[in-house]
Amino acid sequence: MTDNVTQPIDRRILAAAERAIAREKARKAAEAEAVSQAAQAGDAPASRTVKASRSAAERREAGRDTVYLRDVASSEPRKSSRFAPSASELPSNPHPNLPSDVESSAHDAAVQSADSLHRQSKAETQMEGAFEDSDYEAVRPSAQKEAGTAGTAFSTGAFLDAFFSELDRCGVRDYVVSPGSRSTPLAMKAFEHFGDVYVDIDERGAAFFALGLAKATGNPVAVICTSGTAVGNWMPAVLEAESSRVPLLLLSGDRPARLQQVGAPQTCDQLNIFGTHVKKFVQMPLPTADAPSLAYARQMALDACIVAHGALPGAASCDAGPVHLNFPFDEPLKPAPSTGDTHACPLPPTVVPGQGIVPRDAMGLFKVMKGKRTIALCGEGSCNSEYDAHLLLEFARKRNVPLLADPLSGLRCYDDPMVIDNYDTVFGEEEPPIADVVVRFGRWPVSKRCCQTVAAMAPVQIVVDMRDTRDLATSTSLFVRTSPAVFAQAMCDVHTPGTADPACAQEWRARNDAAAQRIGSVVLRPDMDGFEGAYVEQLVDVIPENSLLFSANSMSIRALDTFYCKRDKTFTLLCNRGLNGIDGTVSSALGAAQSFDQTTLLIGDLAMLHDVNALALQNELRMREMRGDGPMPSIVIVVLNNNGGGIFDMLPQKSTEDYFERLFLTPQDVDFKHMAAAFGVGYRTASTVHGFRRIYSSMLGEPGISIIDVPVPLAGLSERYEPYQ
Ligand SMILES: Cc1ncc(C[n+]2csc(CCOP(=O)(O)OP(=O)(O)O)c2C)c(N)n1
Ligand SMILES: [Mg+2]
């Protein structure tokens, strides 16, 4: 790793670390002040008088700065409690009647004899069978309950205090909780430590919501749910997070080992349930409160964050992914509140660096493209920041390499001649420009035609990626394991004059400009009110600067690929492109929306129906605002409603035969107006492009969710796209 390559990133880390240390010092000073005031006033102990010292907004702000650089000054966790006990509830000795190595009566019984183990296990199984995942605790014999509660509740509480305070130090600020009983300790501790958790009753949607949150912030986000099918419902979002490299922490509740495989309710084998789709799985032990166990809980939280993040904070797409931690819990499930002392064990500084390029290798790479017809394919993940984008643009200008910019590359926010936004259209021309060398950044572009044409040209391919080649045709000539920004800077810094063949860049620029003229004229067509392309062109024109545009898969992202032309206008465009799913889109968009004042979701009717219960999150957002957990963002959902799967009109399955509508188009004839009313969200229809522009503009800034229903014909989609391709 060379200094010149990593220096700006290091500066960012250090600046963030310095801010974190300063904040922590200020917090400690405030805490000390509160303690001395409380002592003077003869008040209760400090751990209970000092309330959560930061507001939700402050916590979010703090999260942005967090780095995996351990700050010794912050080795004590925040003391905050939503359900703090009274002084009498907190004995100084947590196990007054038990030797220190004994945790609960249930465990006592378990080690006494095989016979008693069998009896107890059977009794518990029967009880749990009778009361499912609900109010089991209330029906336990009171003597047993009394004996077991103090020890286990204390152990569970202390163990999770260590775990969650470590997550806090690692910068995990967002928690998405789905209700359930076995996950009670996790949910209550997340709430106690962080307060402003999100609650989503649908685990499938909750995981997608978390995915959206993590996509927007680049920080790991935790999801919490109970055992059984609840965990299974995380799978689609886990797959997407794996493919899109999004840092998710999956924290599931489970029953202890003795209740596995014996018919206990809501119990299945959750070990490695996500198989190879998570970067790491940890089966956590039953909580105990001895020092080594607390250190272990901390270490697992730290390791989970490092593995899930896989890269520097804010660089989510480099090497991030989902991590699953399965927590078995014994009764009683309600954990003891934090005493404020979580036995923080100092751990060494941890920095996860990106990989650089040594100057000799950079020189060799540059020689491959020098004087050659070279282009760069820039897919999703090419830029994680404006800083990255500027490095790529500098590389393009300095070395004469046109950047073929996918809508998700982040490069279409720059009206720069080297940004080639209409490459899909150009590749559709009779003789597209050839390339000798192709540099590939990020995911393959949305444009299938681009991928096919590049493959047919059989160029030298330089693949730049932090993890793998993503090469489906063994055509990678050189694999450079680094981020696009580091690569771009290395190519700029090579001490050799010269560029790639300038004729190639010139040809791409000219052809791109000609295509832009054609595409820009879409709104002037007489039949534009029936063409989704015209609505999308207008949407991009009027969308507010610095807002979020979340796109669904299918025709929504394709329409953006064609009709979102580059301009000097900064807004974020996200899409769950990992597996092209039409599921979980509304949830993901709502999750990502939490980081923006204004969000627009562009979505097809079937994708909307797939995740319709996410509209219930309108109430959750309202509730959060009322609790002071954060203002309600404005979210406008634009439904391109062609009453079916319009994309199939573009595919070889297309037919006039009966099977086509029955198996592929699948019109559902749903009235979105009634659907919106059922969830209490705003609704308008726009059947002309001018009307759409007006209605959309009027909905901007409206708190909560509003829907614009845009009816467009299902048939003839490919014919409508024809003039632009
Ligand atoms: C979870 C999931 N199920 C099925 C598919 C296959 N699929 C791809 S696009 C599509 C139709 C989408 O229709 P709509 O959301 O209305 O978008 P349109 O093509 O009409 O723009 C289907 C079923 C998928 N990608 N993901
Ligand atoms: Mg549709």
Image (cartoon, rainbow, N blue to C red):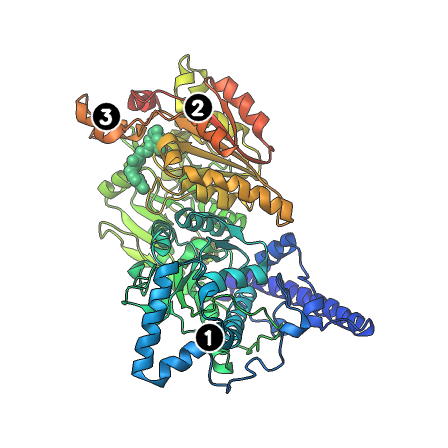
Q: In which quarter of the image is residue 496?
A: bottom left
Residue sitting at 62 percent across and 73 percent down? Answer: 339
Camera-nearest residue between 149 and 22: 149
Q: Which amino acid does label 2 sit on?
A: Val
What element does badge 1 sit on?
helix
What element does badge 3 sit on?
helix
Q: Which amino acid does label 1 sit on?
A: Gln
Answer left or right for 17 relative to 423. right
Q: In which quarter of the image is residue 267?
A: bottom left
Residue sitting at 35 percent across and 42 percent down? Answer: 445
Q: Residue 13: image x %, image y %?
A: 57, 63
Camera-nearest residue between 334 and 569: 334
User: Could you tell me if the residues under marks 2 and 3 are in contact, i.e. CB atoms within 8 Å?
Assistant: no
Mark number displayed over residue 661: 3
Quarter of the picture containing the N terminus is bottom left
Residue at the spot of label 1: 144
Say whether mark 1 is within 8 Å of ligand 1.
no
Q: Residue 144: image x %, image y %?
A: 46, 75
Please name which of the two marks, 2 or 1, marks the residue nearer to the observer.
1
What element does badge 2 sit on?
strand
Please name which of the two marks, 3 or 1, marks the residue nearer to the observer.
1
Mark 2 / mark 3, whichever is N-terminal:
3
Residue 193 seen: yes
Mark number displayed over residue 128: none
Mark 2 / mark 1, whichever is N-terminal:
1
Quadrant containing ligand 1:
top left
User: Could you tell me if the residues under marks 2 and 1 are in contact, i.e. CB atoms within 8 Å?
Assistant: no
Residue at the spot of label 2: 710
* Residue at far right of view: 40
Camera-nearest residue between 611 and 421: 611
